[in-house]
Amino acid sequence: MESGKLPVNVLKKSVLKHIHPYREEISSGAAVGNDCAAFSLSPDCLAAVCHREGVIVTEGIPDFPGSCPLKTLLTKAVNNLLAGGASPTGLELSLFLPEGTAIETLDGLMKEADDFCAAEHLQILGGQTRVTDAVSRILCTVTALGELPAQAALGRERMTDCDVVITKSVGLEGTAILAEKYADRILAHFPEGLLRTAKGFAEALSLRPEAEVLFAMRKEAFERGEPFPMEMHDVSEGGILAALKELAERSCVGLDLDLKKLPIRQETIEIAELAEVNPYELLSGGSMLILTPFGEKMTERLQENGIPACIAGRTTAEKAGILHNEEEIRFLDRPGKDALYGE
């Protein structure tokens, strides 16, 4: 394809044909000449919005920060909404394609986006698709929109003396990428089953399972007329150590944590050691970090629904972040570059 705005026939055949209606509340969505989407919100709901961008990898292994398959980028955008306490409704996509991109590549990307929306019950609201010599690789920006109960946005207080809950395991996303990158080296040391399991972590990046459990608990509390204090954060670049520091700063609290209680799969430990990276600073999509005074009740409910969860420590009034490893004590530093991409 050549530089410039997509011809209408290409727009219809390779983009719009992959956009289907999945949400009843969408009154106006993606169409030729339609530059604004609209959807209804009840008086008890707020609109929630977040934005993600990334270089799209259609084959091979993500090799620098922000590069990933389209499905992964869409998952990250939805995870941001879920971690913000919102129920996702729709997505707007903008694709910037290098000159010479095959129409089949665009067609495949849009089908991938539509398949994702069908599985997640979301709506593609619109966006832009442009071929340009300003990029050498496919660049995508995603704006995700959703609904946030108005009651959930009120009365947030400083979350001191709360449990620090972590779901699933840290380093899942990075482990899956390393498993692809170092497959031969891994097979030289470990059984094929370990490699297969590690690659499968790429299918466990959605936070929807735990979010649905947490939203149900929140709804039950609201129906009883009780508050449900909860701060959530999706663990991503920089790993669990970066996410802990970010959430502590956002919530104006300190942390007192036990390194041995941070949940981590043995596959992650083994592969991270082979790759000579710190697993606690490794890309960790698929894991949610939660501050709540109801840690035991929350982890019990999550586990009942088949979602691994544990309490790794407590928040404190002092703003220092302390990590215990038996007799050793370290302080949480400001987040650095993800271990997956080196220094």
Image: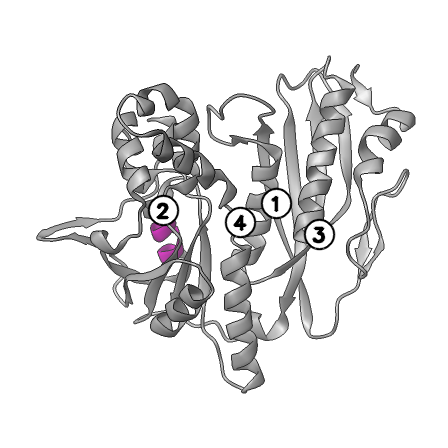
User: How many angstroms separate mark 4 from mark 2 (CA)?
Assistant: 13 Å
Instruction: Give the camera-side residue of 112 and 7.
Output: 112
Near mark 2 (Cα within 10 A), the count class, few <14, some 14-19 or many ≥20, is many
User: Where is mark 1, residue-wise?
Assistant: 51
- Amino acid type at circle 1 is His
The numbered dot on residue 170 is 2
Q: Residue at x 65, y 32 (%)?
A: 140
* Residue 99 visible to an observer of this rendering: yes
- Could you tell whether 2 is left or right of 325 in the image? right
**Mark closer to the observer (1, 4):** 4
- Amino acid type at circle 4 is Ser
- Amino acid type at circle 2 is Val
User: Where is mark 3, residue-wise?
Assistant: 122
Span colored in magenta: 242-249
Near mark 1 (Cα within 10 A), the count class, few <14, some 14-19 or many ≥20, is some
* Residue 293 visible to an observer of this rendering: no
User: How many angstroms separate mark 1 from mark 4 (CA)?
Assistant: 17 Å
Q: Badges 3 and 4: C-beta atoms under 8 Å apart?
A: no
User: Where is mark 4, residue-wise?
Assistant: 206
User: How many angstroms separate mark 1 from mark 3 (CA)?
Assistant: 16 Å
Q: Mark 3 or mark 2, which is nearer the start of the sequence?
A: 3
Return the x and y of residue 116 as percentages of the image width and height.
67, 43
Mark 3 element type: loop
User: How many angstroms separate mark 1 from mark 2 (CA)?
Assistant: 23 Å
What type of secondary structure mainly makes up the magenta span?
Answer: helix
- Could you tell whether 190 is left or right of 306 in the image? left
Return the x and y of residue 101 as percentages of the image width and height.
72, 17
Q: How many marks?
A: 4
Q: In this view, does 257 lie above or below 199?
A: below
